[in-house]
Amino acid sequence: MTGRNDEGAGMAGGKSPTADTDVLVVGAGPAGLATALQAHAHGATVRVVDRREHRVRPSRAMMLHARALEGLRPLGVTEELLNRADTTPEARIHLGRRTVEARLGHADLPDTAFPHLTLVRQADVEDVLWQALHARGVPVDWGVEFRGLFHGLTAESGGVPALSEGPVHADLQDVHGGRGVHRSRFLAGCDGQSSTVRGLLGAQWRGGPYGVEAVMADLELDGSLDSGLLHVAVGQAGLVFLFALGEGATWRMLATRPAVPSPDARFGQLGPPVPAEEVARLVRESGLGAAVREVRWSAQIPLQHRIASTFGNDPIFLAGDAAHAHSPAGGQGMNNGILDALNLGWKLGFASTAGRPLPELLETYGQERRLAARRVLALTHVIFFGEASPHPAARLARNVLPLLAPALPMLLRQRWLTSKGIRLLAQPFVHYRNSVISRDGTPPAKAWPRPGARLPDASVSVDGKLVRLHELTSVPGIHLLLERDAEPVASAALRTLLPAEGQGPLLHVHRLTSHPGQGVVAVRPDGYVGFRCGETDPVQLRAWLRLVGAAPG
């Protein structure tokens, strides 16, 4: 059962769908595609379905941050993403009659290979991820809607039946009305803010709507705006952004305006077009000194701040906008969904191939990512309050900001300030130190980050060659970093821990001759430290590997 395009064959007469898989991903946005790619890279068979008939759609997000790029690097897609991106963006901030230049592509961040803001269309991100899945033979079927679950012979539309004893039976319907059942071990709901999967779980959708909404438009403008820059206009009513990244025209506009409450609002979705005169008013009142010549496309987007009361449990999980909804402030939405995917995908992959239940591992997804989402939601809430809130305090701050314009150039020339801002958007506050799979051995290897912390990039020596840590860990799987004097028995004892025949190795051992000591550090597939120990004790190491499904039970 597939959609009507050339990316899949059609289903006739409601016959059975394609072969069953370990993982069924519902939703082919960035979170769904990245979940599929990460799960497949770690041993799972995967299928993706999306109710959209067409793969290409207007972009809502326009930015990737360093942590998302680091996590995607082992999946082999980062280079193509950067080929389509602007990695040296410069902004012109318009404060009434004054303008301030800000360079955003030259941050002083030595612990990452991506020390910059990266402007890239969501459509390009989705296309790169889809092409990677296509090259690996992972089906992505368009025009196929997830309708609910079958339990026995009855379709379930609410409340999750006791499925841990057997596969998930997904009720799917294609654009022709054909119905079928797809069986999978796991179901990943990446189906957006109006998620069918979230409703099936019965998860509460906590939060509320914002009093403002976003307006997006692709425009042709008259005026002297430099198309090589990101333009930001700060006004009493809010911010207006203009990027030369339009998909149907030269310019993409993102602006905010007061929202009109509606019971039919489709939060986070592209709504109806905005009248051309309203788009022209937003540009005119921004003070950017440009006039709208033509509106090629526009949409209003109701905004909300919400988080699901649960991110799921075995065998059904939520990721991306199905699990949390943000304002567009700080460009966090697409990034946070990708980070969900990178966390969930490897766990589903290992759980699919372990040959035994891994309840502790699977429970860590919700434990880790829900706390991370709450922190990111708090950050975006604060930023959005300053950018767009109609609250008198926020309006006053935006009115005062032009008075500070003479001092801003000097501040923005301080690279430490730019670096701190870019680092903040890359979520340095997200860690998994309290996770049950973040373990310190005895004695701990204190020279390394604590378990649950991100592994920073750094120069190291391996067999006399100078390399970067993130270069070493740039292939899927778990990476064991042995210090220079570590007992060689560690690598010999782990030779049995390769996956089934036909798959690439998912356990990699590197001896760092630049790091004296006898310890070992295990790096998770999503780039976080999982285990560290001051000695290469095979008992402790194998216990952690068994916990995450990388060693026999």
Image (cartoon, grey):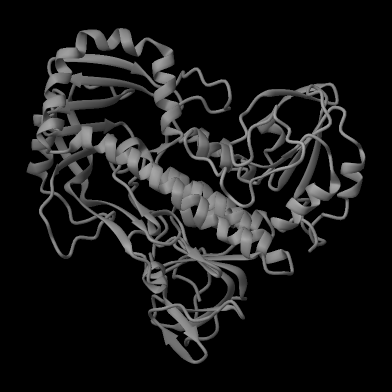
Residue 385 at x, y percent in the picture? 22, 37
Residue sitting nearer the eye, 450 or 327: 450
Residue sitting nearer the eye, 48 or 545: 545
Residue at the image point whose x is 17% and y is 52% from the top: 273
Residue at the image point whose x is 68% and y is 69% from the top: 357
Residue sitting nearer the eye, 374 or 68: 374
Lateral position of residue 114 relative to residue 90, left or right: right
Residue 477 at x, y percent in the picture? 70, 48
Residue sitting nearer the eye, 22 or 158: 158
Height in image: 449 above or below 435?
above
Residue at the image point whose x is 88% and y is 50% from the top: 495
Q: In the orientation shown, which residue stands out farthest toward the front?
A: 442
Q: Is residue 188 visible?
A: no
Badge count: 0
Height in image: 319 above or below 429?
below
Q: Is residue 288 visible?
A: yes
Residue at the image point whose x is 53% and y is 40% from the top: 431
